[in-house]
Amino acid sequence: MLFGRPTRIGSCVLSILILLLFSASFAFAQADPLQTRITTASGVRVRTAPQTAAEEVTRLPIGTILTPMERVGSKEKIGSVEEYWYRIKTPDSKEGWVFGGLTGPLQTGAEEAAYLKIARDRLQVQNPVFADMVDLFEFLTRVSNAATGAKKPELELDRLLALQKVLTAIPVQEHDQAKYKKWVKDHDSDVIYSEPGGQWMVKSVLFWDLQKKYARLPIGEQIAWAGAQNPLPGECEGFMDCELGYFNLTSGRYLNLYPSGAHAEEALSQLSEDITRMMEDLKQRSDALQVSDKSDFHKEMGLAKATIEKTNSPRKRKLIEDLNQIEARIK
């Protein structure tokens, strides 16, 4: 038998075979049917068989990590979702079947990204259910506290946005129900009641404290805008010093921090709407405009104009001119 250098054709074939084997093994690793999974909804039913009519073993909260042990051979369509059923083990060692459409893969080393995707998907839900939003809030509280990676700031912000959703889901006429009263009492350091609207709100200081914490990161601006959009308790009842003060504490505060930010024009548009309403009042009234305290009015007016001056908006001159005209009517 003769031994010699392999031909060029033989080398190419060998290289292709090695590449195909590597690609196949890589694809298999990526598509591992028994990869760890995590529940992506609240009240996920674990059943005794892979059927929606099968008896329930238990229900799982959002963010429960599951160990798959088996997967059915073909997908099933339930509603608009087509997925496999998985036989799984829960963290407390219960076993049963879950529909894959209520779970997602959880890759080692990418847990925080998975948590963030769950949060973003659930925060988009329209007409949120109180219990589901509480479940999401508690999940985000847990994972944001434990997070150490680059996604931690986003998880902390989403936790506050989930808190907003919880409070929105409390029906105005049912605040006195025991389940709502207890939950609010347990979280009274984070929430505040607004009497005129009859609703609970997140304390804005939570957003602004979070913005300070991450001021040097790009997400700082996103947090500031979320703080600017968080409603404040009370009602201005047409008093212009109050309306200007509201602007200075919300959109104006964002503009002071980010005068050229992504939401700068949107923030100015909100002020422009208030100014337009004030200018309409000017046309309809012969007396001075309504303020609760003249010194507060001039103080808030000065702050608002200084904020506008910091921006590069092409309409800032017009906004300041209108504010000067309004201020001139306060004797």
Image (spheres, rainbow, N blue to C red):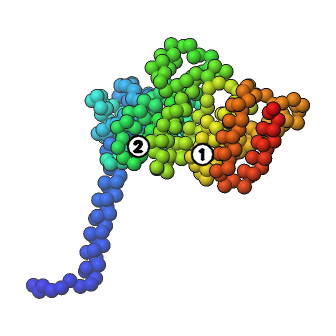
List x then y, in percent, for residue 229. 61, 37
Is 202 located above or below residue 304 in the figure?
A: above
x and y percentages locating residue 253 in the rendered image: 60, 41
Which residue occupies the extreme left position in the image? 1
Rendered residue at 35%/28% (across/down): 48
In the rendered image, the vertical position of residue 322 relative to residue 175, given as above or below: below
* In the foreground, 299 or 155: 299
Query: SS class of the residue under badge 1?
Result: helix
Q: Is residue 10 left or right of residue 331?
A: left
- Mark carried by residue 256: 1
Taking the spot 64% from the left edge, 38% from the top edge, the residue there is: 248
Residue type, numbered disc 1: Asn
How many residues crowd mark 1 within 10 Å: few (<14), some (14–19), many (20+)?
many
* Direction from residue 280 to residue 53 in the image, left or right: left
Which residue is the site of mark 2? 152
Q: Nearer the viewer, residue 258 or 117?
A: 258
